[in-house]
Image: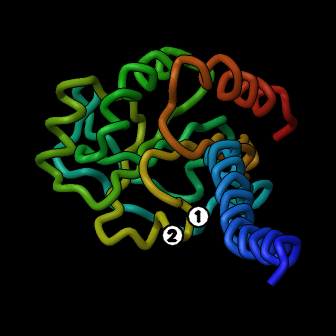
Amino acid sequence: MSLATEETGLKRRRIVVLLPLALFLALAALFFFRLGASDPSHIPSALLGRPVPATTLPPLAGLTRDGTAVPGIAPEDFRGAVTLVNVWASWCVPCHTEAPLLMELAADKRIRIAGINYKDAADNARRFLGRYGNPFAAAGVDADGRASIEWGVYGVPETFVIGRDGRIAYKLIGPITSENVTAVLKPEIEKALKAAP
């Protein structure tokens, strides 16, 4: 066998070995880029522009605000006021982080804040609100998670801006942060306040 034939065979073996490795690295880079570049808060919602789900939720037992029992959630309650609906749970770690920001948003008397308590124990939920404050004018209990499915919830926390017409204007997936309050939520709330009912 000649030296030229051996070199050609060696080059072919290198290509056979390196080609799958190069393909694997290219695919890995593509997946890494796509995962790193995606922002889960930008997942589109099929419910945007549609009326809130026709689901009535019972109140969180024993929850009060300013000495008055906090009512549950009914679809008709969303007409006439811009409402921020927050899906939360006491066991949800990011919910603890966003709780003070919800209290700040509740100071804006132009909007109403409602909460959907997701698969939580009532005692734990009340303790959570006792610790951080209760921003909710209404708080419904979603004990089995069915209502959250109807709202198109991917996981807790999630927040919706509901227009005065009772339609979903915006959906934020993930926790409320000081950054997205300024960059996204407040502008969406302002848009909803300016929109005709």
Looking at the image, which residue sits at the far front? 2
Residue 134 lies left or right of residue 81; in this view the side is left
Report which quarter residue 137 is drawn in.
Answer: top left
Residue 135 lies left or right of residue 9; in this view the side is left
Which amino acid, mark 2?
Ile
The secondary element bearing badge 1 is classed as: loop
What is the CA distance from the residue labelled 2 to the residue labelled 1?
5 Å
Between residue 115 and residue 100, name the one nearer to us: 100
Q: Residues within 10 Å of mark 1 (few under 14, many from 20)?
A: some
Q: Which residue occupies 35% across, 62% down?
A: 142
Q: Which residue occupies 63% across, 44% down?
A: 36
Report which quarter residue 25 is drawn in.
Answer: bottom right
Please provide percent x and percent y for residue 118.
34, 57
Between residue 117 and residue 109, name the one nearer to us: 117
Please provide percent x and percent y for residue 133.
28, 24
What residue is shown with label 1? 152
Is residue 162 shown to the viewer in this render?
Answer: no
Q: Are marks 2 and 1 in contact (CB under 8 Å)?
A: yes
Q: Which residue occupies 30% across, 39% down?
A: 93
Quadrant, the N terminus:
bottom right
Residue 47 lies left or right of residue 76; in this view the side is right
Is residue 195 shown to the viewer in this render?
Answer: yes
Please provide percent x and percent y for residue 157.
44, 45
Which amino acid, mark 1?
Gly
Q: Which residue occupies 65% across, 58% down?
A: 28
What residue is shown with label 2? 149
Mark linked to residue 30: none
Image position of 145 with respect to 34: above or below: below
The secondary element bearing badge 2 is classed as: helix
Please provide percent x and percent y for residue 52.
64, 59
Residue 116 lies left or right of residue 22; in this view the side is left
Between residue 127 and residue 70, name the one nearer to us: 127
